[in-house]
Amino acid sequence: MPVRRLAGEARSQAIVKAALGLFAQQGFDATTTRSLARAAGVSEALLFKHFPTKRALYRAILEYKIRDAEQALPLDDSLLSLEDEAFFLHIAYHLMRRVDADDAFCRLMLRSAMDGHDLAQRFRKARSGKLLDLLTRKIRQRCERLKIQPPVDPPLAARMFSGMILSVMLNRRIFREEVVSRTSLDEVARALVHIFLSGVGKAGSKA
């Protein structure tokens, strides 16, 4: 029984990973259960045994990616103890590296948003919301320490930072923009953080 259960869990994970890539390429509506089964190397009957509907499989992808993201980068208060530059570099480089290694979920999120499915919104609430809250708190912390008025509302500034990362990775992975593509992720992350922190306030700035 335990061996059979583990095999079933492994099969479910294999189906989820195969489906993620296919949904990212074709979108939810255009992807058939037959093509999903073929991509996962299983029969449609076995596919339905693990996931009764396409929407159930879509939800499984979301849950899998949330767990994966939480394990890779726990968004807890311990990150706030990092120095400003180290904090923003840690987040920027981590997110860029993950998308650069596998952009399938990024593509799927974009397709989900364009197709009107709730995958993007649910991931934003479950994961991106935590990230934006942490960024907002760090920006406020920085401004309080430097005794300056934030030049931009901290929640808005947090979204600008995450938006900079998204823009860079879209140019690198989707549009294959030459300058961004040929520059190392470390250099890109450092440039992005330098520009962002210059806007949020430097040491010695006056209120």
Image (cartoon, rainbow, N blue to C red):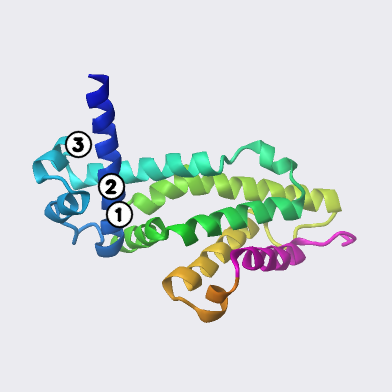
**Comes first in the chain, label 1 or label 3:** 3
- Amino acid, disc 3: His
- Amino acid, disc 2: Tyr
Relative to 197, is 67 on the left or the right? left
Q: Are marks 2 and 3 in contact (CB under 8 Å)?
A: no
Residue 2 magenta: no
Q: Main secondary structure of the magenta part?
A: helix
Residue 194 magenta: yes
Q: Which residue is mark 1?
A: 117
Residue 59 appears in the picture as rendered: no
Q: Which residue is mark 2?
A: 58
Dot 2 falls on a residue whose secondary structure is helix
Q: Are marks 2 and 1 in contact (CB under 8 Å)?
A: yes
Mark nearest the camera among 1 and 3 is 3
- The range drawn in magenta is 184-207
- Amino acid, disc 1: His
Task: State the image coordinates of residue 190 (x, y, percent, origin top left).
Answer: 69, 64
**Comes first in the chain, label 2 or label 1:** 2
Task: State the image coordinates of residue 85 (x, y, percent, origin top left).
Answer: 74, 55
Q: Quadrant of the C terminus?
A: bottom right
Q: Which residue is mark 3?
A: 50
| Foreground residue among 151 and 62 | 62
Q: Could you give the CA–CA distance between mark 2 and mark 3, rounded to whole angstroms?
A: 12 Å
Relative to 44, is 98 on the left or the right? right
Q: Residue at x 52, y 80 (%)?
A: 178
Residue 202 appears in the picture as rendered: yes
| Residue density around tag 3, few if under 14, some if 14–19, many if 20 or more, within 10 Å | some
Dot 1 falls on a residue whose secondary structure is loop
Q: Residue at x 54, y 59 (%)?
A: 96
| Foreground residue among 136 and 176 | 176
